[in-house]
Amino acid sequence: MKTNRDEGGASQGAATAEKNISLTVNGKRHQLVVGKDINPDHTLAYTLRETLGYTGTKIACDHGSCGACTVLMDGEAVLSCTMLTVECNGRNITTIEGLENRATGELHPLQQAFIDNTAFQCGFCTPGIILSAKALLDKNPSPTEREIKQELAGHYCRCGSQYLVIRAIQSLAEKGR
Amino acid sequence: MGGNYRHIGKATPRKDARAIVTGKAEYIDDFKLAGMLYGRVLRSPYPHARIKNIDTAKAEAYPGVEAVLTYKNVPGWMAGVPYHRPVLDSTVRFVGDAVALLAAETGESADEALELIEVEYEQLPAVYDMEEATRPDAPQLHERIPNNIFPRGFRAIGEKALQELVMGDVEKGFSEADIIEEATCAYENIPNPLPPEPPGVIATWEDPDHLTLYTASQSAPMNRNFAQPALGLVDIRVIGMQCGGSYGTKNANFIPMAHAAALAKAAGKPVKVYFSKEEHFNAYSLRLGSRIHARLGIKKDGTVTAVEGEWYVDTGAVSEMAQVQVAVGLGETQLLIRCPNWNLQPTLVCTNRNPSGVVRGFGGQELNCALLPLLTVVMEKADLNPVEFFKKNYMAPGAGFFWRDGIWRDYRGIDFSEAIDKGAELFGWKDKWKGWNKPTAVNGTKRRGVGVGLHGNADIGEDESEANVKLSSDARAVVYACVSESGMGERSSLCKMAAEVLNLPLDRVNIAPADTLVNPFEFGLVGSRGTYTVGSAVIQAAEDARQQLLEMAAPILGVKPEELDTKDGAIFPKKDPQKKIAWYKAMGIARTITGQGRFETDFSLCNCMIIFAEVEVDTDTGKVDLRRIVASTDCGQIIDPLVLEGQLHGSLGSAGIDTAIFEETVLDKDTGHIVNCNMIDYKWRTFADLPKFESIMLETPVDSHRFKAIGVGEIAPAPGAAAVLMAVNNAIGKRIMTYPATPDKILKALGKI
């Protein structure tokens, strides 16, 4: 059995020709040199967490089947563990850290709704769920319960917070109507 | 019916809410120590093998590698009773068992170096079935466990630890019975609770007598309490990180902790061992397997007169505390049925599958999930309504039970009949229940059925807790109780209790990190014990601190302390609230006040959870659709309604309700490999498949502590699997006695395949 976690530096084994990757994360532009800052086999989830320090993005299965690593790419919810960073040149990424207004400390209405409804228990799946919910509400401000469930079907929540998550999103969906 | 309080019983934001929704909550994989190395484990591809040769030279020479350990040079720490679980061994006993440990500067170099370790195995025959494992010619797993049967007893819980359930006279009991039936039921699907966050630990040695562990743990202090004896009583400081889900599985698991500690000792640097999801599936501990053959006697009025049988418990390749789980299980089953005559004999058997370990349910869920379907056999013969049966048989004032320590307890808690009745009413049981093996409704190939299960636990008062509450002159308070946060909201609930006693706004009360160096003794958050045990200690500490504060204020205000009250940081005579002074006037600025509290074990109370389930079975495909759940409990006093509701909703997953229909670990018995060891093939309920879920949370005051509350979180899933199995059996009119009721079993029962 192979243990396939891949924390660690990028210095070893990087043979690719030097190439710059430009990644905008939460409005901040990062220039990443392939072979120096990142390796060709680094996933976006890994780069966000280990290279750029956005540890709010969680990795659970690391195989695209649990939704924990969800971030927004140009406004779409994507599984960052199934994308290579070298494929993301020029992309605009939003992680959970990007939802709070850093100047005022004001939270995004979804974040506040999750707090008000205690829509989490262990919280490990929460960043991914909030970002998927944001992508949904940005497109469809008044989703039905069924639409919310379908949109979040790829998110693994084991504590049983799904019902309160739906309640939290619905509290905003009602405002959108 | 709950009390009228300022904070208690109201929904308030979790203390860590903002950190969680902004991504700032710090889980173990978000945290690094300077110079930290990355630990990796080489794992066995065979279910049972002897390591003939192991060559680590190439791995040791690989750039970045700082430590390589095999059974030859690893510390001799041991776990289990009897000791049978070393850090590494020359024999591997399940696919995924640890063969060698390695630490390197980066994860990548550790992974690459791990592949350079050369191992020559001598494969040994393996055994996976409990009854086969106990035959004389069966492969033997451990020298210290002859015939693969664990010896009974676990002295840490008492010399008389409950290791069999023998009382009364079973022959007399059977002679009094109207109906006697014998049957077998198996709850052996070894489901994986599978918290989203894999297990992980960071270990660092300050010096040979001081080890610090950063853990993703449900019960940080338990790591110190349990690991200290194994590690030669070195001083272990444990710091609990935000824990990404546990469901019992991340309390104090010896192996990852020992692997990190051994590597850190060898390398002289901090080492992190963090499982991949693949390892989480293949190499971490799972639920005990449970199989009962029993004969039951019952009277037509629902009185159970005798239970006699054998309880086989599959511990997997190793177990750290199966004997304790058996003791608690035997206790919990007496809460379920008040039968005067028992002879239930457990046999704990090791097999070549994953180790078993602590999982939400802790022996009781395993036992009752197997026993409840047996009870349905006699209930059916007596034509008894199961709701009435539970009301008649569940623990109530005037009755008692032997608990895990083998000592009899007279029950002094509340009667749970109201919770059963209210649940039945909301569910509409009266209308939906058509009798045994009868569907509630039939529509073409779709057949609906209903079922009910019940479970309780007296571990809500288990073991000791201590707490301090510190008041500072700026009218703030800090709770010192060594409590981790793995999702139950307990840290926030304890702040609410202290804020209630001190009559402070909730944002003025905080709780210290779960760090054994700064907090007094704590056992850990297990068995739904937090609300009563840690809660009692915190309440007492807050009351003590408040008393000290009022004693300081009394001479200044010229009245006796008992004539004073405090609110929002002011102290005033009850009769003259206008004559108030601030806390700092009473205590001075350069002072803190610390109150102390302690809780001693109390096994005389229990909780209760009833689950009603409705399923729809497609008799063409065998697919089961769980349509509706009603969960009902009486918790004395709600501390936080949303937190409690969330705990009840958690009954679906985490090796709970869905173990009745699709959650199982599938073992290939030719190779010993788990075939569904990823999150696609291991089935889990998604948002899109949620049943309608309704909760009843009653508040009949319990004689526990000041707020009359008891915990209930752990047992939320426990009665659910049996309820769903009963519902499936009623829907199809056939009896399935092995979990889970998958489509193949259903179609077979219907004679379609």
Image (cartoon, rainbow, N blue to C red):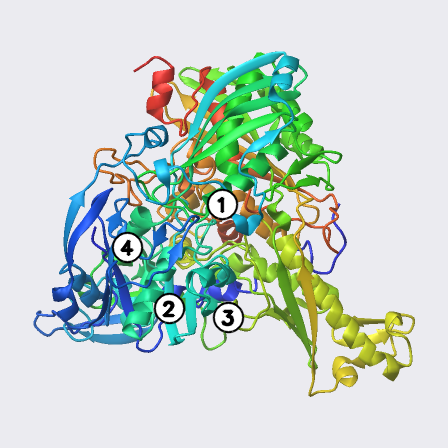
Give the vertical position of B571 relative to B523 (above or below): below
Q: Quadrant of the N terminus of chain B?
A: top right
**Label 1 secondary element:** loop
- Label 2 vs label 4: CA separation? 24 Å
Instruction: Please give the chain letter of the residue carrying mark 3.
Output: A
Task: Kindly identify which residue carries mark 3.
Answer: A106
Q: Are marks 3 and 2 in contact (CB under 8 Å)?
A: no
- Label 1 vs label 4: CA separation? 25 Å
Task: Decide which of tag 2 and tag 1 comes sooner along the chain.
Answer: 2
Give the vertical position of B278 relative to B64 (above or below): above
Q: Could you classify mark 4 by the number of other residues whose Cα lies within 10 Å: few (under 14), some (14-19), or many (20 or more)?
A: many
Task: Kindly identify which residue carries mark 1.
Answer: B360
- Label 3 vs label 2: CA separation? 37 Å
Q: Could you classify mark 2 by the number of other residues whose Cα lies within 10 Å: few (under 14), some (14-19), or many (20 or more)?
A: many
Q: Quadrant of the C terminus of chain B?
A: top left
The reply to whether residue A67 is in sight is no
The answer to whether marks 4 and 3 sit on the same chain is yes
B442 or B187: nearer the viewer: B187
Give amino acid for label 2. Ala
Q: Nearer the viewer, mark 2 or mark 1?
A: 2
**Label 2 secondary element:** strand
Task: Kindly identify which residue carries mark 2.
Answer: B203
Q: Are marks 2 and 4 in contact (CB under 8 Å)?
A: no
Instruction: Please give the chain letter of the residue carrying mark 2.
Output: B
Instruction: Please give the chain letter of the residue carrying mark 1.
Output: B
Give amino acid for label 1. Arg
Task: Decide which of tag 4 and tag 3 comes sooner along the chain.
Answer: 4
